[in-house]
Image: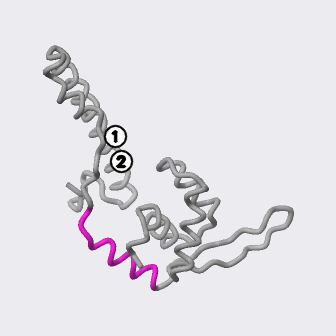
Amino acid sequence: MTGSINLLGYTLLEMIAREASSGYDLAYRLKIMQNTHHSQIYPMLAKLEENGYLLSTTQFQERKPNKKIYAITLQGLELLREWSKTPVKVPVSRDEFIIKLQLDWLNPSRTSELLEERIRYLEEQLRETEKTLVAIQETLGLTSTNEKKIE
């Protein structure tokens, strides 16, 4: 049944494995990390629950709609464990840059400009990734002075 679970599903399972959460809370946290909408999250939560990877309970609230709180099951943890062992897929890219680069014969002077733009973009991505890595290391207590530092 894992073939029907996409990256969003695994992301939700991981988040719920750390802390039982409502769909609203998950949507809020995902909005910060990536461009994900409620219309994607709730159907995936339903599918995960239907497949036995999650259990939900209803939290009653006064003056507010009741909340459905999701918790991961042992089957869900096992699915995550197995998925974590699979190779990371290389992303398929429909990159405008590649197409324009292949048009170098049409506008040769633009080629070096395109390459310079891409280098600047990738350098910025690298800086952002390094910041994220430092934040993760700090969260895990793996500082630059600690010999456990992730390289």
Q: Relative to 34, is 73 above or below? A: below
Q: Quadrant of the N terminus?
A: bottom left
Q: Quadrant of residue 148?
A: bottom left
56 horizontally vs 121: left or right? right
Q: Which residue is mark 2?
A: 132
Q: Quadrant of residue 117?
A: top left
- The location of residue 64, given as percent across then percent down, is 81, 62
What separation in Å lies between label 1 and label 2 (alpha carbons)? Answer: 6 Å
Find out whether residue 83 is within the magenta segment. yes
- The location of residue 35, given as percent across then percent down, is 50, 47
Instruction: Determine contact: label 1, label 2, CB under 8 Å.
Output: yes
Which residue is painted at 55% across and 58% down in the image? 40
Q: Relative to 88, is 130 above or below? A: above
**Extent of the magenta region:** 75-88
How many numbered discs sit on the rendered protein?
2
- The location of residue 78, given as percent across then percent down, is 39, 82
Find out whether residue 30 is within the magenta segment. no
Mark 2 nearby-residue class (10 Å; few <14, some 14–19, many ≥20): few
Q: Helix, strand, or loop for circle 2?
A: helix
89 horizontally vs 6: left or right? left
Q: Quadrant of the C terminus?
A: bottom left
Q: Quadrant of residue 140?
A: bottom left
Disc marking residue 128: 1
Mark 1 nearby-residue class (10 Å; few <14, some 14–19, many ≥20): few
- The location of residue 83, given as percent across then percent down, is 33, 73
Q: Helix, strand, or loop for circle 1?
A: helix
Going by the numbered disc 2, the residue's amino acid type is Thr
Going by the numbered disc 1, the residue's amino acid type is Glu
Which residue is painted at 19% across and 25% down in the image? 103
Extreme residue in the front direction: 106
From the image, give the main secondary structure of the stretch colored magenta: helix
